[in-house]
Amino acid sequence: MTNTLVVVAHPDLSNSRINAAWYKALLGQPGVTVIDLYGRYPDGRIDIAAEQQLIEAHERIVLQFPMQWYNCPALLKQWIDDVFADGWAYGSGKAVAGKTLSIAVSTWSKASDYQAQGRYGRTLEELTSPFEVLAFRIDMHYRPGYFLSGIGDIGDDDLRDNAEKYRHYITAFEYQYSVDMA
Ligand SMILES: Cc1cc2nc3c(=O)[nH]c(=O)nc-3n(C[C@H](O)[C@H](O)[C@H](O)COP(=O)(O)O)c2cc1C
């Protein structure tokens, strides 16, 4: 079985709908480890060795977050900066080479906003390309991603259904899935 580590980076998971539903859908799934990054490090001081050990124990890493100002939340960026360190992830180290990296992202704005001709003139793939280049740089396989856009009006049934799909995406090791609720 492929072991998957899902790093959930929501600044306030207790007030989240989407990311909390995704998070709960994964709890207790065989082969899946889920961590709540903000809950784990409320003071923002990341235990780098512990995180590196966790990554070493998994073949696939999924970074899950709500889009915030066209980027990931700050603690996830810090986690990347701290954990993928010189001598471990690159330089003399190759700890993550051959592993798979994916992202799972929720956005308030609808999918049509994230098009070349849309409101933002940038696709989600473009806006999240730093994750792809990170993977390339440290010899991981990048497999985009699980996207849910236009979440403003999502009802409870649709969210439950989407969380089921997310669970399938993670446990079946699928690689690409996007839904627009708008
Ligand atoms: C500080 C902040 C910045 C945000 N920036 C964006 C953004 O750039 N694009 C977008 O589509 N939604 C943005 N949103 C909306 C969130 O992405 C959306 O509320 C979230 O994905 C919903 O997930 P949740 O129910 O797990 O909180 C932002 C929200 C906050 C609080």
Image (cartoon, rainbow, N blue to C red):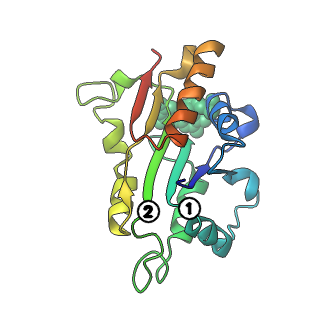
Residue located farthest toward the left when viewing the structure as drawn: 117
Residue labelled 1 has its Cβ within 8 Å of some atom of ligand 1: no
Instruction: Give whichever of discs 2 and 1 has the lower sequence position.
Output: 1
Which amino acid is tagged 1? His
**Residue 128 appears in the figure:** yes
Q: Is residue 122 left or right of residue 105?
A: left
User: Is there any visible trace of residue 68 in the rendered image?
Assistant: no
- How many residues crowd around disc 2 within 10 Å: few (fewer than 14), some, or many (20 or more)? some
Task: Give the secondary structure at mark 1.
Answer: loop
Q: Which residue is mark 2?
A: 99
Q: Residue at x 66, y 39 (%)?
A: 23
Q: Position of residue 118 (x, y in %)?
A: 29, 24
> Which of the two residues, 12 or 40, is positioned nearer the viewer here?
40
Q: Position of residue 123 (x, y in %)?
A: 31, 35
Quadrant hosting residue 27:
top right
Residue 124 location, quadrant: top left
Would you name the residue on which mark 1 appears?
A: 58
Tell me where residue 13 appears, x and y as whole percent: 71, 39
Residue 15 placement (x, y as % from top left): 73, 32
- Type of the residue with mark 2: Lys
Against 15, residue 64 (above or below) is below
Residue at 40 percent across and 41 percent down: it is 175
Q: Residue at x 59, y 71 (%)?
A: 52
